[in-house]
Image (tube, rainbow, N blue to C red):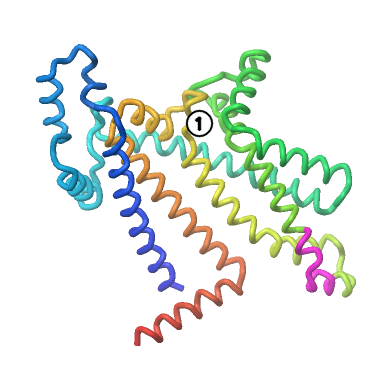
Amino acid sequence: MWRYIVKRLLWMVVIVVCVALLIFTVLWFVPGDPAQIALGSEATAADLEAYRELLGLNDPFLVQMGRFMRDTFLRLDFGISYSFKVPVIEEFAIRLPRTFLLGAFSLVLNMVIGIPLGILAANHRNSVIDRGLLVFAMVFSSMPQFFFALVLVVVFALELNLLPPFGIATWKHWIIPVLAASLSGIAQIARHTRASVLETIRADFVTTARAKGLEERKVIYRHMLPNALIPVISDLGMHLSMIVGGSVVIETVFSFPGVGLYMLYGINARDYPVVRGCVLILAVFSAFVMLVVDLVYAFLDPRIKAQYVNYAAKSGGKAK
């Protein structure tokens, strides 16, 4: 098991390095001059050239890439923002916890609301409740996130004047962003839970448990749900990665000072250190979340854990 974890961690390193090379290459070919954006249209050619030299933008491609990889992975230095004039890592220390909390709160809503809705719909298959859930899942899974966010702002902030439309000053400021970030996830988790529960209901061990005369509650909560919810764990991990990694939309609509809004500022200003740092941090976070999901899988399902152990044993045998 430990050998499998170490191997996955090594793959995480490979993935992050590949992401770093890719984002650096993409930004190299993106049109736009950071010096021109930073100094404005009134800057002279000499000023622009001096600023590019100061930022190291006149160096060859391989020289800039090597410096970026060295600073990032050996010194853990993401550079200094062209626009904010402060180290990128300092902004991360402030903004990343906010984005993570936004994703964590949304994930909690996904679990607390989505899973019970899916179970309820599966236990009342083909009823009004079940069909209503399917409609709910179809609508909110298809609705663009920014559109629903704007609807929430119009209804709760402008029309009803119940909640503030932007900022994070108080706990009320978090309500609309969390709802906007989690509603599509609630719909998808509910639909996947319903499908998983319906599949597990027809399993032989559930039929056997009922044939033994066990109470329906024990059949559901002791035998059916622990197995039915295993596939849902992967969905929850993916949703957390998507919420945190795709926080640009939510944070832009609500002026939420997180990593997503920071990265958007960097893209608009051609602030390369900001964009590179944000992409790398989000890549590390997504890879780590998926690793945790795999380990939770192994903890909940003995069959998967046995596969990991056998895989490690075979790898050790080949190494010998």
- Say if 284 sits above or below 140 in the image: below
Q: Which residue sits at x=60%, y=20%?
A: 153
**For the residue labelled by badge 1, is the local secondary structure a helix, a strand or a loop?**
helix
Drawn side of residue 179 relative to residue 248, left or right:
right
- The image quadrant of residue 45 is top left
- Say if 89 sits above or below 149 in the image: below
* Location of residue 95 in the rendering, given as x and y in whole percent from the top left corner: 39, 34
Q: Nearer the viewer, residue 20 or 33?
A: 33
- The stretch drawn in magenta includes residue 17: no
Give the magenta part as a residue range: 198-209
Q: Which residue sits at x=71%, y=61%?
A: 228
Q: Which residue sits at x=21%, y=45%?
A: 68
The quarter of the image holding the C terminus is bottom left
Residue tagged 1: 249
- Say if 210 sits above or below 164 in the image: below
* Location of residue 53 in the rendering, given as x and y in whole percent from the top left corner: 11, 31
Q: Amino acid at mark 1?
A: Val
Q: Nearer the viewer, residue 213 or 133?
A: 133
- The image quadrant of residue 32 is top left
Magenta: main secondary structure: helix
* Location of residue 254 in the rendering, given as x and y in whole percent from the top left corner: 51, 24
